[in-house]
Image: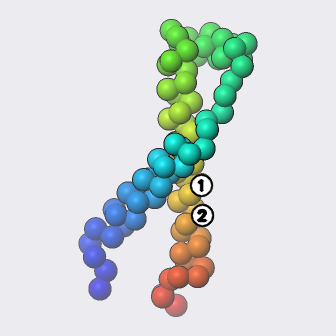
């Protein structure tokens, strides 16, 4: 019998692993010219706002990739369902 919170714990675990990956893998570093162009394009006040958005997107991207990779691995090799 499956635990009722199993899906919630699975998603939380994957997000935790994505958070650890964000800490271990550096986010994309922009040059000063590119950063200033993006700041003017998105009407940001300072560089901190830009890098906050970049780190949030980086976290979401890695979390999504890890979710699908781990789901594939689980279904392919570890799942007991037929």
Q: For the point 46% across and 58% down, which residue is it?
A: 14
Residue 41 visible in this rendered orientation of the protein: no
Badge 2 crowding class, 10 Å Cα cut-off, few under 14, some 14 to 19, many 20 or more, is few
* Few, some or many residues within 10 Å of mark 1 (<14, 14–19, 20+): few
**Which dot marks residue 46?**
none
Q: Using residue 12 as the reference point, say whether residue 52 is left or right of it.
A: right
Residues under labels 1 and 2: Cα distance? 6 Å
Instruction: Please identify the quadrant where the N terminus is shown.
Output: bottom left
* Vertical relation: 42 (above or below) 14: above
Q: Secondary structure at mark 1?
A: helix
Position of residue 81 measured from the top left corner of the image (x, y, whole percent)? 48, 87
The percent position of residue 39, horizontal first and vertical second, equals 60, 13
Residue named by callout 2 = 69
Task: Identify the residue shown where x is 61% and y is 38%.
Answer: 26
Q: Residue furthest front?
A: 24
Residue 13 figure quarter: bottom left
The residue carrying mark 1 is 65
Tell me, yes or no, whether the two marked residues, 1 and 2, touch with CB atoms within 8 Å. Answer: yes
Instruction: Name the residue located 56 percent from the left edge and 30 percent from the top edge.
Output: 54
| Quarter of the view holding residue 6 | bottom left
Is residue 74 at least partly visible in the picture?
yes
How far across and how far down the image is residue 15, in percent? 44, 53
């Amino acid at each position: 019998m499956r635990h009722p919170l199993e899906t919630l714990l699975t998603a939380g675990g994957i997000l935790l692993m994505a958070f650890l990956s964000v800490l271990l893998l550096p986010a994309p570093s922009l040059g000063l010219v590119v950063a200033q162009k993006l700041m003017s394009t998105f009407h940001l006040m300072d560089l901190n706002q830009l890098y906050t958005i970049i780190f949030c997107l980086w976290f979401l991207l890695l979390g999504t990739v890890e979710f699908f990779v781990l789901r594939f691995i689980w279904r392919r090799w570890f799942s007991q369902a037929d």
